[in-house]
Amino acid sequence: MTIRRFVRFNVAGFAGILVQLATLWLLTSRAGIHYQAATLLAVAAAILHNFVWHWRWTWADRALTRRGAAHAFGLFALTNGAVSLGVNLMAMPLLVAGAGLPPVPADLLAIAGAGLANFYLADAVAFRQG
């Protein structure tokens, strides 16, 4: 693991957090969608956002063809996507219904819980070299 790659992962991830939180806020506050369904859609938007940034910037040195990128996206969705969805969908009811937090701060806490696992999985699986 290089520090540079880890920093890039976190910069792209931070932007993904903004995408996820903005999507969640729009869906719950403006569209009136229940926080659990909105969380699913918000995480999906962040996963897509993060994959593109990681493909084109974080792991740009690991050149992928379009076909390779499609394969990497599948792996990214199965690893980072599964961790992000699992953590978010399990934590949100506990934090919103259980602890009484509003959906956006609750989601921010849930996102923090998945960060390190997602870096490892992206580096070792989705964008694995060779």
Image (cartoon, rainbow, N blue to C red):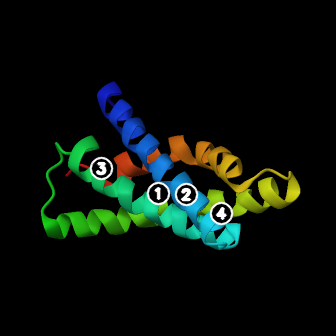
| Front tag of 3 and 2 | 3
The residues bearing labels 4 and 2 have C-alpha atoms spaced at a distance of: 22 Å
Which residue is rendered at x = 29% and y = 56% of the image? 52
- As drawn, the label of residue 124 is none
The answer to whether mark 1 and mark 2 are in CB contact below 8 A is: yes
Element carrying mark 4: helix
Element carrying mark 1: helix
The answer to whether mark 4 and mark 2 are in CB contact below 8 A is: no
Residue pointed to by mark 3: 53
- Reading the chain from its start, which is encountered first: label 1 or label 3? 3
Q: Amino acid at mark 2?
A: Ser
Residue pointed to by mark 1: 80
Outermost residue to the front: 30
How many numbered circles does the render carry? 4
At label 4, counting other C-alpha atoms closer than 10 Å, the crowd grade (few under 14, some 14-19, many 20 or more) is few
Q: Amino acid at mark 1?
A: Asn
Q: Amino acid at mark 4?
A: Ser
| Front tag of 4 and 1 | 4
- Reading the chain from its start, which is encountered first: label 4 or label 1? 4
- Reading the chain from its start, which is encountered first: label 4 or label 3? 4
The residues bearing labels 1 and 2 have C-alpha atoms spaced at a distance of: 6 Å
Task: Please state the horizontal and vertical placement of residue 47, each as a whole percent of the image.
Answer: 43, 60
| Front tag of 1 and 3 | 3
- As drawn, the label of residue 29 is 4
Splitting the image into 4 quarters, where does residue 119 fall? top left
Element carrying mark 2: helix
- Reading the chain from its start, which is encountered first: label 3 or label 2? 3
- As drawn, the label of residue 84 is 2
The residues bearing labels 4 and 3 have C-alpha atoms spaced at a distance of: 27 Å
